[in-house]
Amino acid sequence: MTTNAEGIKKARTSQRIGEQHVLNRNVSRHTLIDDPVTKTDVKTTQEFTTAGEKETHRRHGRFRLELEQHEYLLKINGDYVFVVHSKGEIIGEKRFKARKLEEEFNLMAKLKAAKSSAAITITWTSLLTAKYVKGD
């Protein structure tokens, strides 16, 4: 079983993979968005991750979106870049204007409904279809 600390470490490692791929650098965890100059935030997930208490149950990876960050990207007309990797190899990516994502998924309503955490998760398969995956 993966502990919470192990899960956080995996998430941070995964995020660094996406930051290196898109921005060619690691980003401080203390910034609201990853690149204020290009108005871009990079979200990264693994193709598959384990779910539940048994390491044998797999599920698609998920991107975590936060209310404060989403509001800011909408205000500055910023972008998200969603990156999916498998064991460190990039297998898919897609850039979305925050406004376009808002139009398609109505994120503000969902984020505001998530009162306790002010965050939601979206599976990568909801955002990246097979036509976006490299090599196809």
Image (tube, rainbow, N blue to C red):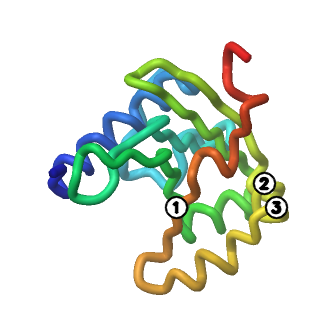
Quarter of the picture containing the C terminus is top right
Q: Looking at the image, is 22 positioned above or below residue 107?
A: above
Q: Which residue is mark 3?
A: 104
Q: Looking at the image, is 109 positioned above or below residue 34?
A: below
Where residue 78 sits: x, y (%)?
72, 50
The residue shown at (72%, 32%) is 130
Q: Report the amino acid beneath label 1.
A: Thr
Where residue 72 sits: x, y (%)?
64, 63
48 sits left or right of 9 in the view: right
Q: Residues within 10 Å of mark 1 (few under 14, many from 20)?
A: few
Label 1's element? Answer: strand
Q: Which residue is mark 2?
A: 77
> Which numbered marker is on residue 121?
1
104 sits left or right of 95 in the view: right
Q: Residues within 10 Å of mark 2 (few under 14, many from 20)?
A: some
136 sits left or right of 40 in the view: right
The residue shown at (67%, 51%) is 126
Q: Report the amino acid beneath label 2.
A: Asn
Q: Report the amino acid beneath label 3.
A: Glu
Where residue 108 sits: x, y (%)?
68, 75
Q: Quadrant of residue 93?
A: top right
Q: Please name whichever residue, 56 or 84, is drawn nearer the observer in this view of the structure.
A: 56
Q: Looking at the image, is 55 positioned above or below residue 16?
A: below
Label 2's element? Answer: loop
N-term-proximal mark, 1 vs 3: 3
N-term-proximal mark, 2 vs 3: 2
Distance from label 1 to label 3 (Cα)?
15 Å
Q: Please name whichever residue, 64 or 79, is drawn nearer the observer in this view of the structure.
A: 64
The residue shown at (82%, 61%) is 104
Q: Quadrant of residue 76?
A: bottom right
